[in-house]
Amino acid sequence: MQYRRFGRTNLALSVVTLGGMRFPHGWEQPRTEVPTDMLEECCDSIERAFAAGINHIETAQGYGKSEHCYGRALNQELKIPRSSYFFMTKGGPRTGDDVKRSIEEQLAGLQMDHFDLYAWHGVNSPGTLRDILVKGGPIDVLKSYQEQGIIGSLGFSTHGGYRTICEAISTDLFDFVNLHWYYFWQRNWGAIQLAALHDMGVFIISPNDKGGNLFNPSELLRELTLPLTPIQFNARFCLQSPLVHTLSFGMHQPSHFDEMLGIFPVQSPLSDTDTRILSKLDARLDSDPYSRYLGYELEGDPSGINIQEVLRFRRLLKCYDMRAFGEYRYNMFSNNDWFGGAFATPENVAKVDLSNVPENVPLQGLLTETHNELFKPKK
């Protein structure tokens, strides 16, 4: 295992974090009751993670039973000293009073008296950022818990747009940021550089799932990343930069840990083997004439379509045969800010503002094509 300073938190975190979202029964109700097989799998994962040198666990109040499961596993079943690992959890309280209720519930569920790291969960839109920064609101109250030592370092987690992320970083109120960035989604690189200027810890969310459903890769992608697996290459790609400090891995089976260990040693710059893989992946972008255009400048387009993501799904389908990932993510679009975006239906495509689109890019046709390829009507 390798370790990196997590920005101004000054914690030396393992470059792989044990994520807590994917245990069986995790989303069943009631969230306070932990089934035996879930608890056993959690205990096994913790022991394997610590044996591999991982020293950081991450979960959230919004991850169903996860906090209660970790509380029992760490403190009752395994009786692991609290000082031997770092723990991050997250919550999305909307008011100052909500913060107090949430923190008390989370401390009780996790059977802890403090969190090393606490992230406001879901700074996904400018409106949400404004709401949580109001005087006497969530961030002010979380800061008071930080002053009491109940929260060590305060950060934010985001699935939002690039501008929102940079705006949140620029407040300088947060010690770390949890965001998306990996080989198949590099748009947030500027936000990572901005976080470095603020000496913030950088935590990469879901590199194996949101990063391309890499545990279920296409045959083409498997071939392109040999002798590594897609998960291993993507992790090395992320960790080649010292500005990235740790990646969340939702490992819950023995094989997951075996694959994770194949990441090491991480090298910066990339090794010759990794560079050859990168070159092969990059070369696939030439297999489609429009794959390099992702419409970054069209954030907030009046059509409501999440144009950047739709074009990304198209790229992954055309260049890497990643149909399963595209179908999975495209059909998750909703009208909330967690994964917001309208479908590229004829009605919505007609509303696209083409004034900033290069003349040689048939954007409306690309959006329609992707919708026809990936959309699955609900039965």
Image (cartoon, rainbow, N blue to C red):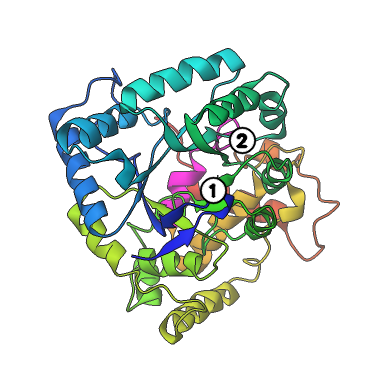
Picture layout, residue 4 above or below residue 31: below
Residue situated in front as seen by the camera: 115 or 274 = 115
Residue 143 drawn in magenta? no
Expressed as whole percent of the image width and height from the top left, the position of residue 289 reads: 65, 71
User: Residue flagged by tag 1: what amino acid is it?
Assistant: Thr
Q: Which residues are magenta?
A: 323-340
Expressed as whole percent of the image width and height from the top left, the position of residue 276 reads: 46, 84
Direction from residue 247 to residue 54 in the image, left or right: left
Query: Could you tell me if residue 27 is visible in this image?
Result: no
Check the picture and name the quadrant holding the C terminus: top left
SS for tag 2?
loop
Expressed as whole percent of the image width and height from the top left, the position of residue 284 reads: 53, 75
Q: Which residue is mark 1?
A: 9
Q: Count how many numbered circles sit on residues in the image.
A: 2
Q: Residue sitting at 44 percent across and 60 percent down? A: 322
Q: Given the current orientation, which residue lies at the most extreme right position?
A: 355
Q: Foreground mark, 1 or 2?
A: 1
Q: Residue sitting at 73 percent across and 40 percent down? A: 171
What numbered label is drawn on residue 123? 2
Q: Residue sitting at 63 percent across and 41 percent down? A: 174
Can you tell which quarter of the image residue 222 is in? bottom left
SS for tag 1?
helix
Picture layout, residue 277 above or below residue 13: below
Check the picture and name the quadrant holding the N terminus: bottom left
User: Residue flagged by tag 2: what amino acid is it?
Assistant: Val
